[in-house]
Image (cartoon, rainbow, N blue to C red):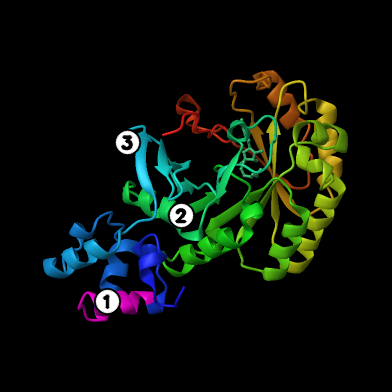
Amino acid sequence: MSKSNYLQKNSFIDLNEPELIKLMQDVGGESFRINQINNWIYNNYVRSWDEMKNIPSSLISQLKKKIKLHSLDLIDITGVKDDPIRKFLFKTKKGNRIESVLMHDKKRTTICVSSQSGCILDCNFCATASMGFLENLSSTEILDQVLYLASYSDSKITNIVYMGMGEPLMNYRSVMESGTLLKTKMGLGTKRITISTAGIASKIRQIADDNYGFKLAISLNASNENTRNKIMTITKKYSLLKIMKAAEYYFNKTKKLVTFEYVLLKDVNASVSDAQNLMNLLKNFPCKLNVIPYNEIDGDYKRPDIENIESFLSSLDAAPFMVTVRWSNGTDINAGCGQLAVKDTI
Ligand code: SAH
């Protein structure tokens, strides 16, 4: 592809600088229009060419003929305007479906993005795994989820979490590129962007070396190899020990705290002795722990009852690290952690 052959690109937001310049020349627009258009897209989150008020309509109609604005097609929204949680369904260029979630609470407005359609891993408690793996998203397909959801949000987006469909570290380049675009184009600080991984140890080391500055969360979900092997088959490739070594490498290199996520599954990993093992595993490691009571899907796993959850948490009272609990909202619309899955084809 020649460096300015924009016609082969999917959408305007996919274009690099030489392509933007070539496009503008071809439609007879002055180069300052590029900045104006970018301002509409990345600061005002417009979704159509027609909303760009300071661009002459003749130029708009030329641009429309050349290229579409966004890379994703919005198919459906679950939830209404003032709901604290809304779920968005998109179709990718290749025709696969993905979901993203917009969440408001008192202090924060968070967008949860997908990095893959389906997932390359098969953690057997997670709904996304049932879709199989369909595709890795491009960096702009990840960015576009944020642009779309931001346009539907009345409050400013404060945080981005890569906790939707997919394993971000198995789509490393696009994920890191998209995070960089969120920073450079949308002005989001790297500390507000969290990448969550099921524990791809080699890539955790790579993140530490590349030092992009994003936050890292590791879905631990078990305190011993045996239990983890049963629920997350990736443990056969990257043992708990390897993941902990990689996390240690990450901390030593970046000096940033890792957040460990721990999904609480009834009769699997939620006993008091599991909590004690977890504390022993993490106690000498600078980290935070986020406990996630399981969001049930059609399957064998259940959320522990409330007394069980409370006794698990109180066994961690003496932990030298911070413990938080994520009571996922949006489970009524299947928008909670691990509930994202698209069952039908379009
Ligand atoms: N693949 C990445 C990101 C997607 S999953 C990862 O594993 O981290 C995001 C988080 O949701 C993970 O911590 C995962 O363990 C958790 N999760 C998956 N299914 C869940 C469910 N049904 N209920 C609650 N949390 C779930």
Relative to 27, residue 11 above or below: above
Q: Residues within 10 Å of mark 2 (few under 14, many from 20)?
A: many
Eye-nearest disc, 3 or 2: 2
- Residue tagged by mark 2? 141
- Residue tagged by mark 1? 24
Labels 3 and 2: the sequence-earlier one: 3
Label 2's element?
helix
Labels 1 and 2: the sequence-earlier one: 1
Relative to 80, residue 30 above or below: below
Residue 82 is tagged as 3
- Amino acid residing under circle 3: Asp
Q: Residues within 10 Å of mark 3 (few under 14, many from 20)?
A: few
Is residue 317 visible in the rendered structure shown here? no
Labels 3 and 1: the sequence-earlier one: 1
In the rendered image, residue 20 lying in the magenta stretch gets the answer yes
- In the displayed structure image, the side of residue 331 where residue 68 appears, left or right: left
Q: Residues within 10 Å of mark 1 (few under 14, many from 20)?
A: some
* Residues in magenta, as a range: 19-32
Nearest the eye: 87 or 274: 87
Nearest the eye: 25 or 296: 25
Label 3's element?
loop
Q: Is the magenta stretch mostly helix, strand or loop?
A: helix
Q: Where is residue 187 in the image (x, y as percent from the top left)?
A: 43, 66
Q: In which quarter of the image is residue 48?
A: bottom left
